[in-house]
Each structure stands twice: as C-alpha cells, then as structure tokens.
Amino acid sequence: MDHLHTSKTLEIARAKASFSVKDMELYINGHKNIQLREKLLKILRAEPELFDMSDIYFMGRKERMEKAYKLDVRAIQLFREGKLEYDEIDALFNMLEWSAPFFVTRAMFIPTLVRQANDAQKEAFLKPALEFKIIGCYAQTELGHGSNVKGIETTARYIEETDEFELNTPTLTSTKWWIGTLGVSATHASVMAQLIIKGKNYGVFPIIVQVRSLVDHSLLPGITVGDIGPKMGLDTIDNGFMQLNKVRVPRFNLLQRYITVEKGGAFSRPNNVNPKVTYGTMVYVRVNIVKNMAQALSKATTIAVRYTSVRRQFGESGKQETPVLDYDIVQYRLLPLVAKNYAIMSATSSVFDQYEKCSSEIENGNFEMLDEMHATSCSLKRYASNIGVFGIDTCRHVCGGHGFSQFSGLNELYSTNYPSMIYEGDNYVLATQIARYMVKSANKIKNNQKIPQNALTTLLGRFINGTKATQADPVKKAKLFNWTNKTGKEIADSHMVMLNLLGYKLYSLTMDLEAKIYGRNQEWSESSVPSQDVATTHAEYLVCLFFGMNITKLPKNSNLRPILNELFTNFALSCLTRNTGELYSLPVDACLTHKQISELEDSYIQSIKRIRDQAVPLVDALGVPDEKLNSSLGRYDGNVYEDYMQRALSEPLNREGTGEEIRSRFFVKYIGPTIHAKRTKSKAERVMRLAEKQKATSGKLVVMDLDEENTKETENNDVMEVEEPKKISLKKNKKSKKTNKSMNKKGVSKKGKRSVWIPQKR
C-alpha cells in the first residue's frame, strides 16, 4: 500500500484553499508588516552562523545569555550602520522568537522617558538611551508588591537642604524584584517610588537613578543589585533585584512633564491632568502584549495545524491511516483557536489606532480618552494572554507525544509567554479594574450624568435607555432584543444579531454588579468573582466589534469575505456558548430558550467542520516563516520526520565529536561499575551456604564464626548455633524429638546465638 509523504499531504491540503492566501496575508498582516518581515528575513539569512536558532534547544542559561548578547549587539550595530530602524530591532528578535537582553530599555525605559520626561530631561536621559549610551530598566515591582502599585514601599524623600531626593527600600519586601535588564545590564533605572515632600506623600512617581558606573560598570554607593535566579522561561533576560540605601539623586531626576516640584519642595500639577497618566507606560506595554500574544498564537496554531494535518493515526484496515485533524475532538480543540487568532489579530490593529489617537489627545492636553484606553488595554491584555497561553498549551497537547519535544517549538513558546498573564497586571486583578470602569460608566448613564462617548458607553446607554422605553411597547422590545423571535440557527446566521446578543450579555452582567455595588453597598473587594465574567465578556464584545468592522471594510466581492465571515461566526458562537448559563440567566424579556441555545451549540460544531478544509491555507496566510517557527513539526515543506531525526542527531549525546566521549565517560563512571560490580555476600547468605554444605555431607550440627568462617561439630549433633543474622527463619527437625535446653522459647540460645535445625542423614 502506497503512503502519502507528509510533504505531499500538505500540498493536497493547500490546494483546497477557497481564497487567495496572498490576499489574506496582506489583509491580516498589512503591507508594512510584510515588507518588514521580508527585510528582516534577508538580514537573518545573510548571517546564518549568528542568527541560526536551531542550536538553542541544547543550551544552558549562560550559553543562551551569551548568544542573546551577541544578537543584541549585532542588531544595534545594524541600527548604527543604518541597516535597521530603531523600531525594527525588537521586530528582529520577535522574528527569532527570542528575548533580547536590552529589550526592557526599548520597551519600558525609553517609553517612560518619551511620555513623562520634560524637554531638559529628554536631553539628559532620552537622547543617550536612544543611542544606547546608557542601558535602562523600569523598576516598579517589589518583592512584596506587584499589582498594587499604590502600595509599593520604596520611598523618595525630598531633602530641602541639598535639593535632592533620597531613595530607600526600607524593608525586605520593598526590594525591587523581577526588574528586567537590571541583573547584569542596566546602567540606569526608572524607579517608581512614593514621593514624600515635607512629610506629605504625593503618590507614586518615576525617578531616574543611575545604578552602575559608565566607566567600569561597578555598582554605585548605596545600591545592591543581583539576578533573581532561574525562572520558568525568559532565561536570556537578566531579571534582577535592587535595594537602595540612602541613595541621593538631584531633584532634576524626578520626571516632571505632568508635575512640578520646585526648589524648596513646592509641588504642583495642572488641573486637567489625569493622575493615571503616570501609569502610561503600562498602557503602552499592555497594548504591545496583545500584539505579541496574537503573534505567539499564530506560531502555535501554524505548528499544530500543519502537524495534525500530516500526522496519521488509526483508520480503516488496509488503508492509509487518518490525519489527526480529521478527528472531531481535535478539530473542536484546535480550529476555534485559528478563528480566535484571526479575531485578535484583526482587533489588534484597531486597538493600536485607538492608542495612537489617545496619545495624540494627551499630547494636546486632552485626557478624556485615558480611562477608556486604560480599561481597553487591561481587557485585551487579559483576554489575549489567557487565550494565547492556554491556546499554546492546547496546540502542544494536540501534537501528542511529539509536542513534548523541544523540537516542536511549542514548549519554549509556552514558557516564554506564560508570564504575560501575570506581568503588567495579574489577569484576575485586572478584571476588577475593567469591571469598575463598566459599572461606574453604567451608573453615570443611569443617573443622567455626563460621560465620554465611546463604543462601550454607547452600548450601555442604548440598553439602559432602551429597556425603560420598551417596557410597554412589544414592538420596540422585539426590536431591541432582536434575538428573541429567532431560532438559534437564525441567530448564528446574523453577525449583527450575535454581536447585539453578546453586547446585551455584557450589559446584563454589568448591571447585575452595578446593583450590588450601588444598591446594596457591596465592596469591590467582595466583587472579584463576578468581575471576571464582566471582564471576559467586555473583551469578547470588543474583539467581535473590531473584527466585524474590519471585515466590512473589504469589497463585497472580495474572495476573503466568505472564510472571514465563517471565522467571525465561529468566534462569536464560541463567545456565546462559552457559558450558556449566562444566556439562561438573562432577564426574562431577553433570555434564550433551551432550544435556541441547543441550536447555537449545533451551529458552532457545524462551523468548526466548515473551517476544517481551510485550516492549512489559513495558517499559511498568517505568514510565520520557518525561522520563527524553529520547529520540526511545523515546517512549511512538511518534512516533519526528516527534520526531527536530523535535530535528534545534533543532540550532544549523539553528535559526532562529543557523543562518543560523553557516552564513554558515563559508562566508565556510572554504568560499568553498576552492571559489572562483584556481589558481596551477606552474613545470612554465608550462613545458609555453609549450612547447606554441611547438610549435604554429614548432616552434623555446625557452629559458625562468621568473622573467621570456621566450623566445628557440636555434641548434640543436630543443632547449629550462629551469630544472629537478619531474616533467618527457624526450621525445626520434625523427626527429632530432642529439645535443646540451651535455647529459649524464641529459638535463641542462652549464649545469644540463633539456632537453626538441620535434619541429619540417617
């Protein structure tokens, strides 16, 4: 029986595409990103001896850090030579799926200076940072404080006599911890500290502190720094700790774009400035996490879809086995992740547009969008990281045993991205911030208070005001709740109805919590559990909204519309059926029936089946190159097993030149001595051996001296006395009617020797 090669199987799968893969790649990635990818690939392929990443799976931490430093230094050289733009440095590392040692400088230290430093401070700190003449980090998290930024213990007290700030980490728990780039690399830190002037605490603000000498990299007085040690992932990043003991810096080092501290300690802030602007760096980082998680999930789904398409298991006797992706349970776990991947990637572009607009407004002194942007960044960071991390793990799982191999490319991906659910706000904690924004907005609308208009406040206003207006009007009520008079299949066939239903679910969850907070005086500390559902539904609604809006921008005759509509349907149905109890518990005028919900679930399964044949073309369109995949299982050419074997042969235990020496050394030191060791007989074994020998010859009683191993006959000629060994049972001579009076009841002689009965030859 002929068997299709894995590469041929992929070719057949690609031939089933119902759309232009090239057009889809342009739609989902954009022309600018595709151009950047090709530019970066050209650089990587020009220097394979440096940028080849196939060896990283065999490296320890020191080797990985060394390689990462070489790569970062080379990237900065390319930047200085004009071959890379500044923003393209981290894009290069993203292409390699590798963490750069100086990443935090570019991702957090510099953005903080851009957004919060005044012109003079930008000249002093930002300019050298952009030229990599100083290496910075962002020191916020402490050993005892993470999500609760307001509770951090590090202090910056103004010293009026010298016009300086004195920084201290007064307790063990105030030690700065998890600070990326600090352990080895950083020369400067943006330290978040409690600003205290003349005994008054003004809150948390960033202060620039030089950590190490620019001459010999030695630590400056009063500063203790180290690496925090082994982590689950990101081992090329030198996450560090820092303790500050009476470290003084000029007043100038307090970033003062939105506040002013005069000589003498006078503090001021413009009335129109939103205090949350201080946390602007976190908003920026969260938005980038959404993008990075979409790219990570793209890598995972590409590997898993390609591999499960060529991996064959079971099937009819006499025929080639069935591709794993043809099994319903694999489709159910994997294909909705492809839909979610497309939805999140589509939403990411809209979120970045929103962030740029918000930043522009802030530049002009308008902070009206900041609260919404904060809530949106929290929501989508939380959602994208949850879907991304658990999605990567699902992709690893559907790859079976080979998913456990580092050569799958999925384990490194999982450990690298797992912390995204925790840093820049633990996802469970962020849920309360999102719910708080929604509940406060709903309460203001309910009480006719002024509130900034955006997609979410418009949604809340429509249902708050609409519910009041339709109470006595069945026609208006049916229009507002336009899913109540439709079958589940009809709901699934309408993007607008599904989005409306999802929006109403968000409204309903929000109003339930609003009634508890404002009506029953429930504390927010008691509201963390319902906040999770509000936050998740908030993100699902936004992603659906953005995804649907971007699809409508395509020409109506676009060849991409049918499959994108199918992906939208699948994503929306996955959101609606995620927790059907929420649909049952909607207010009576809007709730769904059991039949409707059952039909929605059936529609979801049918949608998954319709996506099956388009799975390989869909992940191809994501445009993830083999350099980024670094995976045997996800290779574009489908040569899965050939590459897998080649990588295994590259293992140092197998590699020519090292393998034989390692195996020989292990044999000589450990294996050989174990299997060839001479066995030393125990006292008990020697007793029994001599006893059996005596029995075979004369049947006489023998007394043994185990140290000298000599023997002698006894007078009664039927009992052998020996030093008491362990696990020697008493054996009585049934034929002998004599009793040895020298033994006690336990069979031990009065001389402290155990007696063994041996039958005599007659």
Image (tube, rainbow, N blue to C red):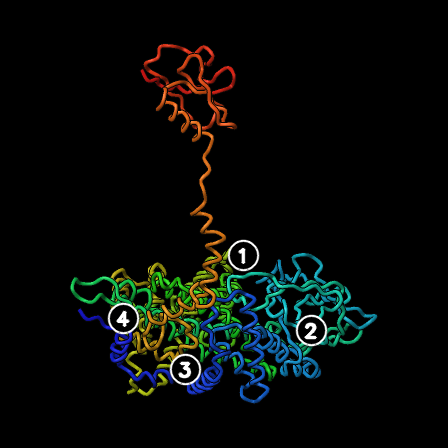
Is the Cβ of the residue at disc 1 closer than 8 Å to that at disc 3?
A: no
Q: Identify the disc placed on residue 29.
A: 3
Task: Check the picture and name the quadrant holding the C terminus.
Answer: top left
Extreme-right residue of the structure = 161
Asked if residue 366 lies left or right of residue 302, the reply is right
Asked if residue 310 lies left or right of residue 684, the reply is left
Q: Identify the disc placed on residue 208.
A: 2
Circle nearer the N terminus (1, 4) = 1
Residue neighbourhood size for the residue with mark 1, other residues' Cα within 10 Å, grouped as few (<14), some (14–19), many (≥20): few
Can you identify the residue that label 4 sits on?
607
- Percent of width and height locating residue 525: 54, 56
- Percent of width and height locating residue 462: 41, 73
Asked if residue 7 lies left or right of residue 534, the reply is left
Can you identify the residue that label 1 sits on?
525
- Percent of width and height locating residue 720: 43, 19
Q: In the image, what residue type sits under mark 1? A: Ser
How far apart, in angstroms, are the residues tagged by discs 3 and 2?
37 Å
Circle nearer the N terminus (3, 2) = 3
Q: Quadrant of residue 573?
A: bottom left
Q: In the image, what residue type sits under mark 4? A: Ser
Circle nearer the N terminus (1, 2) = 2
Residue neighbourhood size for the residue with mark 3, other residues' Cα within 10 Å, grouped as few (<14), some (14–19), many (≥20): some
Position of 762 relative to 459 (above/below) = above
